[in-house]
């Protein structure tokens, strides 16, 4: 039973460089003797013995096991003369976490000492095996491989060079040093870059932008009276801030009311006062119908809103509009009357009447009406009777990708803000809050002038898709769902795997008219990528992947499986050798980056959490094996490119922004150097940095220890605004508006208001069940953690995620198919793929809908724990059906058939 | 004399298993062994499905059946803390205390050396001034609390927030009841 565990111990000793052979005696159990980082032995006979060994060495750092980046401390000790990490702890009182740390964070030590980690650079042989290479060999070969695609040493500003360089696509997800990676891409000259937004929350970001002219607003959970969550599952998959879970539960215990709208009875729903099942993909209809009820019955927080809606009051154009009921200022745009009237006109359409909406969303009309009244505070949930709106009432609606990953996801995300706005939840305590004091991105981000916005020449734009720069990262993302098509486009047209890049809604028609981009040389970029109506141009030939596994993580996984071997060259940076790497063509490279506990990283503002809090990753132990930090890798690769292919002075050394950045960070107490030179440890908490405009912890403490206190918008803050409609001319939304208007001619309105659009896919006779590839959970983060035994253990037979993934299916649907819990079933979708998986028949999911968590189905044999564990549900989801505004694929509206295997 | 009391707030517990992994990491347990787990129960019919979370670890029972059943007297109660402890030298690995009779909660296991192991409230990990076991420290929702005192923690703190269970309660039958 324990054989494998003991083996792991020997492996640990080997990887940790402990060669003394010393047996570290236990402090309590036989397990303890075999632990990495076990305390020195003490004579004892009982497990209550109090150890008096030297205190553990604590290094304040941050977690990197998911994108929440929680504050954490690494607890070190010395074993046989070697410093090891014993465990990782949360940071008491941290505003982002409330002091806790999830299972994934705890397992960071298991990742650090995982014997299956990449240990050296590897080059793929022709027979598919991997060859160990030195870093020098790797850097030179990678430079050569990339250069062979670019084929020129001309400066990256040259059109022809940029065109050639753009055949290398840069794909990132959760890699560290993203700024360095982006800068390398820019120096190399490629205009193609994607991160995680197009497979994550891009629709929410864009929807938020439409409402508040910013990519993010954060709800203030502590002081909320009424929380309405649409497809947001805080207690299974806390998004953006671990502290949300704590604050939500605390809020419930102190009188706050929680209502969860979801097709699945989630853990979060189990804590709710009311659970509202909804037909998947129809939340937008529910939301807009609630808005109609609010306006129709003058339930708005401010009577003047109702007056404006009814055309009785003309607000001052462009003025700040201070409401007595709203604790702060909402700046309405110019022509407020017309804008509000447009919103009113939209939601007063017959389709949004509760009785009509109920048919669409499956929520009874009486429930819609009651929820609207409760949300505005005028119906008491306890007795269902009307009441005066309580003083300081705060209600907030929120979501994540739960409603975003539908073809109406952007609109749903925006409408949700409008609902909150009508109830007075914008920019108040307990509602949505803006974040003050966040430093300008140029102050903390590695920013190269060459990074720029590359929309015009990118694959995304060339294929005719709108570009919404701010839905992504500072690198301005393209749609990663297009990548495999652009790779297969390079095959001969008669090849069975030849594919065109799916044309976007703005693609030029065959006659050459319409939106089409050309570069300075007059070259049509669509021809370069084979996008839209163009003839195949060779597409994408190279990939530079930073910590992501698209062959498992992305939609249409089988398309990636077809495409990746067709590349000319690929290079990846990762902790593991994964499925994607195994599909690389011969000659490709995988470079081992160290884990977060082995490096000191530049501070990363946790903008996703809305905090003016910065993280500092600090080195707890020196990098194991031959792994290196991302900084070291990018700097070294830049040097290799410079030396071999002639950029005077090197990739980064001559970059003015890089120099300025390094100067700035040097004076701020932060460090941005590669690891071998950096052993600096900070003993103080570094949660903010006054040098770059952030706040220090003491400031937060002054504000009552609560991050939102004192941070609400003020009249002096010109950026805090909210609109029910959009006439934005901002580059981030203008093309989305164009697409939406072009495809909604029957209901076109100016200015644009949130509008209902039905999901494109609805159940059919062939595929009668709706399907969702479920997201990450508290104890599992997709491929990144699939190899850690602590995180894929079978915690409980009734746990939402177990040691493998199961298809969640309602007993009614199971019964009609003769499926018992635990039985093997086939699941097939319209994209032609079929998977075999075990069923979990449960009352936690509505009839007509099945769900399967992703993060399983790893195929790389080097990841021994993850290998062949469970199945990859992303094989079933289509990448051709995307949200046109954001490039986000829409897996949540997939339809399938399930039969007994 | 009991001085350590573990309180659970089941309204706050949401089955994230951070406590399980924190304990496993600290004690170097293989994934199959848990000193501490969270039971999830599902009842009712959709949409009125109820999901409940119940943290479980050694109850440090007043009338601990494991102490009674041990044939070699290896299981005793620590006089200072009230925690049930196992003498690893005396333990012969007979597994009687791991049976349903020996521990109705199923919270005892065998380690790789054939000795019985279980939760001991992290007594041997506490340095001066520190009382919170790692499961308590890591809990993202604050669902756990370690109370140190001579009297049972009734009517105070988490109890007032409702739906509380506590290990080691004074109304100890055999084994302890939960409140």
Image (cartoon, rainbow, N blue to C red):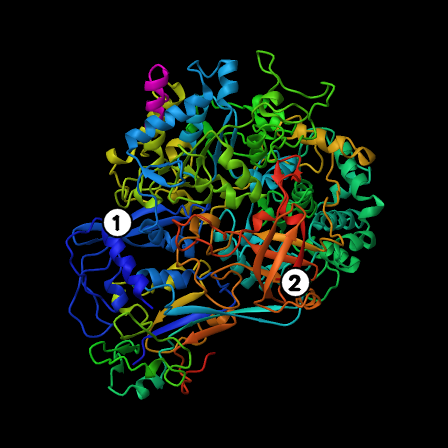
Q: Is residue A647 magenta?
A: yes
**Callout 1: SS:** helix
**Callout 2: SS:** strand
Residue at the image point whose x is 67% and y is 30% from the top? A503
- Find residue A445 and name its label: none
Residue at the image point whose x is 26% and y is 49% from the top? A15
The alpha-carbon separation of the residues under discs 1 and 2 comes to 51 Å
Q: Position of residue B127 (x, y in %)?
A: 24, 63
From where the camera sits, is residue A530 visible? yes
Q: Chain of mark 1?
A: A
Relative placement, left or right, of A628 versus A429 is: left
Question: Which stretch did the figure color magenta?
Answer: A636-652
Q: Quadrant of residue A311?
A: top right
Q: Quadrant of residue A317?
A: top right
Residue marked by disc 1: A15
Residue marked by disc 2: A274
Residue at the image point whose x is 31% and y is 76% from the top? B3
């Amino acid at each position: 039973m324990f054989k494998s565990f003991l083996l792991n111990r020997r492996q640990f000793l080997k990887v940790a460089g402990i060669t003394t052979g010393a047996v570290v005696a236990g402090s309590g159990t036989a397990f303890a003797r075999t632990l990495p980082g076990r305390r020195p032995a003490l004579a004892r006979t009982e497990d209550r013995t109090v150890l008096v060994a030297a205190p553990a060495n604590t290094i304040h750092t941050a977690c990197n096991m998911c994108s929440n980046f929680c504050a954490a401390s690494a607890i070190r000790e010395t074993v046989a003369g070697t410093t090891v990490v014993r465990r990782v702890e949360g940071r008491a009182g941290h505003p982002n976490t409330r002091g806790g740390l999830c299972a994934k964070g705890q397992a960071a030590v298991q990742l650090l000492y995982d014997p299956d980690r990449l240990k050296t650079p590897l080059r793929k042989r022709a027979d598919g095996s991997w060859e160990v290479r030195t870093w020098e060999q790797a850097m030179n070969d990678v430079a050569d491989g990339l250069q062979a695609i670019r084929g020129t040493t001309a400066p990256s500003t040259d059109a022809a060079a940029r065109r050639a360089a753009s055949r290398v696509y840069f794909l990132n997800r959760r890699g560290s040093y993203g700024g360095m990676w982006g800068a390398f891409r820019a120096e190399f000259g490629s205009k193609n870059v994607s991160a995680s937004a197009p497979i994550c929350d891009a629709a929410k970001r864009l929807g938020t932008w439409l409402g508040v002219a910013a990519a993010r607003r954060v709800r203030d959970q502590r002081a909320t009276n009424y929380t309405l969550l649409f497809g947001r599952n805080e207690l299974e998959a806390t998004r953006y801030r671990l502290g949300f879970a704590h604050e939500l539960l605390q809020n419930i215990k102190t009188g706050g009311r929680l209502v969860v709208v979801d097709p699945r009875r989630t853990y979060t729903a189990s804590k709710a006062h009311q659970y509202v099942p909804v037909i998947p993909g129809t939340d937008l209809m529910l939301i807009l119908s609630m808005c109609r009820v609010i306006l129709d019955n003058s339930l708005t927080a401010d009577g003047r809103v109702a007056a404006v809606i009814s055309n009785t009051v003309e607000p001052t154009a462009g003025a700040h509009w201070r409401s007595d009921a709203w604790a702060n200022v909402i700046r309405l745009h110019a022509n407020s009357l017309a804008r509000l009237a447009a919103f009113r006109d939209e939601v007063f359409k017959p389709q949004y009447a509760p009785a009509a909406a109920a048919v669409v969303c499956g929520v009874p009309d009486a429930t819609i009406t009651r929820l609207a009244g409760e949300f505005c505070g005028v119906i008491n949930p306890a007795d269902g009777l009307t009441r005066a709106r309580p003083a300081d009432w705060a209600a907030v609606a929120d979501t994540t990708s739960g409603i975003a990953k539908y073809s109406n996801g952007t609109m749903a995300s925006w409408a949700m803000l409008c609902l909150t706005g009508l109830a007075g939840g914008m920019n108040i305590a307990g509602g949505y809050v803006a974040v003050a004091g966040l430093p300008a991105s140029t102050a903390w981000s590695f920013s190269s002038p060459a990074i720029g916005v590359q929309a015009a020449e990118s694959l995304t734009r060339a294929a005719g898709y709108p570009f919404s720069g701010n839905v992504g990262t500072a690198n301005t993302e393209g749609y990663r769902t297009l990548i495999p098509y652009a790779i297969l486009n390079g095959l001969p047209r008669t090849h069975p795997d030849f594919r065109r890049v799916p044309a976007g809604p703005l693609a030029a028609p065959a006659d050459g008219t319409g939106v089409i981009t050309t570069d300075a040389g007059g070259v049509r970029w669509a021809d370069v990528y084979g996008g839209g109506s163009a003839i195949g141009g060779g597409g994408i030939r190279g990939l530079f992947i930073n910590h992501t596994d698209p062959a498992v993580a992305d939609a249409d996984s089988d398309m990636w499986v077809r495409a990746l071997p067709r590349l000319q060259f690929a290079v990846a940076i990762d902790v593991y050798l994964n499925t994607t790497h195994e599909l690389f063509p011969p000659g490709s490279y995988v470079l081992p980056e160290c884990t977060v506990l082995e490096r000191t990283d530049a501070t990363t503002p946790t903008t996703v959490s809305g905090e003016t809090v910065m993280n500092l990753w600090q080195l707890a132990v020196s990098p194991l094996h031959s792994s290196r930090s991302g900084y070291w890798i990018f700097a070294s690769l830049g040097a290799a490119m410079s030396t071999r292919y002639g950029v005077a002075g090197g990739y980064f050394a001559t970059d003015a922004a890089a120099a300025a950045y390094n100067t700035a960070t040097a004076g701020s107490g932060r460090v941005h150097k590669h690891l071998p030179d950096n052993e600096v440890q900070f003993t103080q908490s570094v949660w903010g940095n006054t040098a770059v405009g952030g706040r220090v912890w003491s400031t937060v403490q002054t504000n009552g220890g609560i991050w939102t206190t004192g941070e609400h918008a003020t009249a002096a803050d010109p950026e805090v605004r909210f609109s029910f409609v959009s006439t934005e001319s901002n580059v981030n939304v203008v093309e989305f508006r164009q697409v939406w208007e072009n495809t909604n001619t029957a209901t076109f309105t100016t200015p644009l208001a949130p509008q209902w659009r039905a999901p494109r896919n609805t159940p059919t006779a062939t595929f009668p069940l709706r399907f969702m590839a479920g997201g990450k959970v508290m104890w599992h983060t997709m491929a990144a953690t699939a190899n850690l035994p602590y995180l894929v253990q079978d915690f409980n037979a009734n746990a939402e995620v177990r040691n493998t993934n199961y298809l969640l299916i309602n007993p009614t649907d199971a019964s009609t198919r003769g499926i018992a819990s635990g039985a093997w079933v086939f699941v097939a979708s319209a994209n032609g793929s079929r998977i075999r998986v075990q069923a979990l028949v449960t009352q936690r999911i509505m009839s007509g809908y099945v769900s399967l968590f992703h993060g399983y189905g790893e195929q790389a044999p080097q990841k021994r724990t993850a290998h062949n564990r469970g199945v990859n549900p992303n094989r079933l989801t289509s990448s051709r059906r995307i949200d046109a505004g954001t490039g986000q694929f829409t897996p949540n509206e997939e339809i399938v058939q399930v039969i007994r295997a | 004399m009991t001085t350590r009391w573990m309180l659970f707030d089941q309204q706050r517990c949401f089955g994230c298993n951070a406590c399980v992994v924190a304990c496993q990491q600290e004690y170097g347990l293989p994934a199959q062994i848990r000193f501490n787990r969270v039971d999830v129960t599902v009842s009712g019919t959709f949409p009125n499905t109820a999901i409940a979370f119940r943290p479980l670890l050694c109850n440090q029972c007043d009338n601990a059946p494991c102490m009674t059943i041990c044939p070699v007297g290896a299981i005793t109660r620590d006089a200072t803390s009230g925690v049930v402890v196992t003498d690893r030298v005396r333990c012969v690995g007979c597994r009687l205390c791991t049976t349903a009779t020996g521990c109705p909660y199923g919270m005892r296991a065998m380690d790789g050396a054939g000795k019985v192991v279980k939760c001991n409230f992290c007594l041997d990990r506490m340095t001066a001034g520190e009382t919170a076991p790692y499961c308590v420290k890591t809990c993202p929702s604050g669902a756990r609390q370690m109370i140190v005192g001579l009297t049972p923690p009734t009517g105070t703190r988490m109890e007032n927030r409702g739906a509380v269970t506590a290990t080691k309660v004074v109304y100890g039958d055999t084994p302890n009841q939960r409140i």
